[in-house]
Amino acid sequence: MSTDVDAETEEVSGSSGSDGDGAVPVGVKLGSTRTVIAYPTEDGGLQTIRTLTCLASYEDALTGEEKYLYGEEAAREYPDRVQFMLRSGLPEDEDRAELTEQFFSTVIESHDIPEDSAVVYAIPTIDNPAGLENLQNVIENSPIGTALMESYPESLCGSIPAFGDDLEAIEQIFIAVNMGSTNLEASAYRRGEQISPFTTGAVTGNEVDRVIANYVEEETQGRVNIDITTAREYKEEHADFEEFEPFTDIIQQPGGGSHEFTIERSVMDACNEYLDDVVEEFANTFLSQLANDHMKVYQLALDRPVVLTGGMACIPGVVEEFEERVGEALGRDIEAVAADRPDLSATIGAQRIAARLAQND
């Protein structure tokens, strides 16, 4: 079995919150598209590991043994059969839980994450008891977190870096919108307490990828068919609400030769439709629910910035577009913010919580 994972590692700005003594504080997000792990460096900084939450099996040509590739390498080499174990946000059954456990253990071993660690997991807000139990089993069976193991809502963890360099978000009243690959989540938070959590699978980053693939086929009059992995790459590399620019790509023709094509509308048409759907669910469903259940929290939270988290919040200009479209829907000014790196923010927030809990412990 392969014991390596194709992953991106980088040191991000800011303090890890670790004092260098005791258990190592680690933040983890096992995401439907990407898994991110954050832990302190020796100089007090913060190291992150970021990889696709996927694997692909293949047969060794010499021995016939089943082997596995993980992360970007699996998606790149086997796009036709790569498995994203958490495509619905959680491991749906025991088989997917086992694959997720295998994947996660391999990531940890590949990067020498210490067993004697205080680990906080950023967990999605999903009404799926069986899936949550499967994820809990993955977490409990992982080789890390022997000193401490806790979980907090992903949208709360993702909001922490948007408020400052410490844990200021825990003392605030605000609304967080998690624009993830699998679900759209919205919650109000009152000093760390989650209020009126809302989740829908009808508006997702994964659906944007599928729509982009369909629109590319339409825009090229059927001459180009791209897979979901390529559509996701188009979105991540080119989507921009501020200054989108048409781009060209080349495909190889089945009979030989290549075909160059230009994409002018497909990516942003899909992203604009997605953001309209986000605003519809947020303004007309979630906020109505929050106002009915907790009117005072609703009033106080709307006077504070709405925090956008999740992978779709990485698109340039999405914060300003969200502000404008929600403001038009509500007939009032709305402010929105996001962390500098929304794709890392849930893990960074979880790591900060882990550092505080380790210090207190």
Image (cartoon, helix red, strand yellow):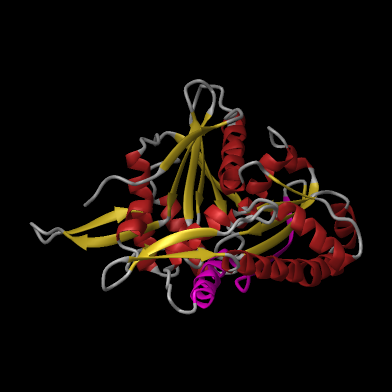
Relative image position of residue 303 (x, y in whole percent)? 88, 51
Range of the magenta residues? 193-220
Q: Quadrant of residue 161?
A: top right
Residue 198 lies in the magenta stretch = yes
Relative image position of residue 237 (x, y in whole percent)? 53, 53
Location of the C terminus (image quadrant): top right
Find the residue positioned furthest to the left. Answer: 62
* Image-based side of 281 in relation to 117, left or right: right
- For the point 61% across and 56% down, the residue is 245
Q: Is residue 194 visible?
A: yes
Relative image position of residue 198 (x, y in whole percent)? 70, 66
- For the point 51% across and 20% down, the residue is 43
* Image-based side of 62 in relation to 12, left or right: left
Q: Is residue 146 visible?
A: no
- For the point 62% across and 33% down, the residue is 356
- For the point 63% across and 69% down, the residue is 269
* Residue in the foreground of this view, choosing between 333 and 240: 240
Q: Quadrant of residue 9?
A: top left
* Image-based side of 188 in relation to 76, left or right: right
